[in-house]
DNA sequence: GTCTATAGCAGGATAGAC
DNA sequence: GTCTATCCTGCTATAGAC
């Protein structure tokens, strides 16, 4: 942790830029300039752009894994607050999109490897949301119509959309959307 | 109507392609091939790509205007069913995205003219949704927490996200999301 | 209004020296 | 592991003939 490798820097910076402007608009030179190396050096770590794209998705997915390990120690309502807060942080950080939202919105035009990586990641989130809702129903903390799985679907759609529409319509729109989600389960 | 001008064909085909693969991935040649002309001929109608982009957004916005003129003759609940059905049609037609969703997700990387056109369009939809929800509350047909404006924000986020996440997770996810919306107002 | 031809640029990717 | 140099491709856009 004392010194971060260039490989890690590349992934981290790429992730941030992709969340801001999307996979297609992001390019090697933007990263190279920020680190202070040439773009050919990035090809040393990631021969093709899609290799870097996969690394970004897996890095984000891995971070999410670490997060839920801690979140799962708390009550279902606290867990949902944690993920709402995570999205609030994305919004506050220059209105960036979540990884599944930015890759999902360009899904029809990314290499198959990237599609697969996004699919795996999103199913993990869906699974975690479903379990959280199920736990909340069992404990009596949550009350809503439909199945936990259906509520997880609705949350995924709304979370991804909240950042995109919030970028256009501003903070009020974004926060009204998150409030709607929170109210939909209690 | 007997014969559609090439200009109209260009806008219509561009709109469909943009909804499927996004503004950046769409290019003049794809349209040219479909119509059977050369891409330089498209520049005759739309000198720059962003001119065509603006035309596409305004065309979609104009169609929406025509639709709500008819929808507004019906009850609030019927009106909301009409827009849910519109999104179901998008999904059925090769899982394409709505115009505000596809331009919104690439908002940070499109010319200012396009940003403005999307903003105008989305505010029109937000306005119509707000009025519909207000009418439904007044008539007693709808019952929900929060303001009509906040519910409109939530709907916009969720509708845009439903198509994107539905593309990844399939028809069940998509329909669960639409059901969630319908249940949130009654 | 459509064509051919071509300019011009950006970005992904590779070869080979250090 | 990073560099310079270069290739290649795809796409936007323009000039000018028909």
Image: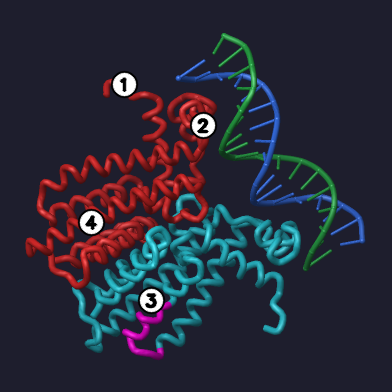
Chain colours: A cyan, B red, C blue, D green
Residue B111: percent from left, percent from top: 51, 47
Which numbered disc, 2 or 1, marks the residue that appears first in the sequence?
1
Disc 2: which residue: B47
Report whether residue A130 is seen.
Answer: yes
The chain to which mark 3 is attached is A
CA gap, disc 1 and disc 3: 52 Å
Residue D17: percent from left, percent from top: 62, 11
Residue A77 included in the magenta stretch of the image:
yes
Give a yes or no on whether discs 4 and 1 share a subunit: yes
Which numbered disc, 4 or 1, marks the residue that appears first in the sequence?
1
Q: Which residues are magenta?
A: A73-85
Residue A127: percent from left, percent from top: 37, 74
> Mark number for residue B129?
4
Disc 3: which residue: A84
> Mark number for residue B3?
1
CA gap, disc 2 and disc 3: 44 Å
Q: Say what secondary structure mark 3 lies in.
A: helix
Does B24 sit above or below residue A53? above
Q: Nearer the viewer, residue C12 or A90?
A: A90
Please tell me whether mark 4 or mark 1 is closer to you in this view: 4
Please tell me whether mark 2 or mark 3 is closer to you in this view: 2
**On the rendered structure, is A136 left or right of A63?**
left
């Amino acid at each position: 942790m004392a010194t971060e490798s260039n490989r890690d820097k590349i992934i981290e910076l790429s992730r941030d830029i992709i969340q801001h402007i999307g996979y297609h608009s992001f390019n090697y030179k933007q990263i190279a300039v920020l680190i202070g190396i040439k773009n050919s050096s990035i090809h040393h770590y990631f021969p093709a752009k899609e290799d870097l794209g996969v690394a970004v998705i897996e890095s984000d997915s891995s971070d999410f894994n670490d997060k839920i390990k801690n979140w799962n120690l708390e009550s279902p309502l606290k867990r949902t607050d944690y993920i709402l807060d995570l999205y609030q942080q994305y919004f506050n950080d220059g209105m960036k999109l979540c990884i599944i939202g930015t890759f999902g919105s360009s899904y029809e035009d990314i290499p198959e490897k990237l599609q697969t990586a996004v699919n795996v990641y999103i199913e993990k989130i869906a699974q975690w949301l479903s379990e959280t809702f199920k736990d909340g129903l069992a404990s009596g903390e949550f009350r809503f119509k439909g199945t936990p799985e259906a509520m997880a679907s609705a949350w995924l759609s709304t979370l991804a959309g909240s950042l995109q529409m919030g970028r256009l319509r501003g903070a009020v729109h974004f926060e009204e959307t998150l409030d709607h989600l929170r109210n939909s389960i209690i």
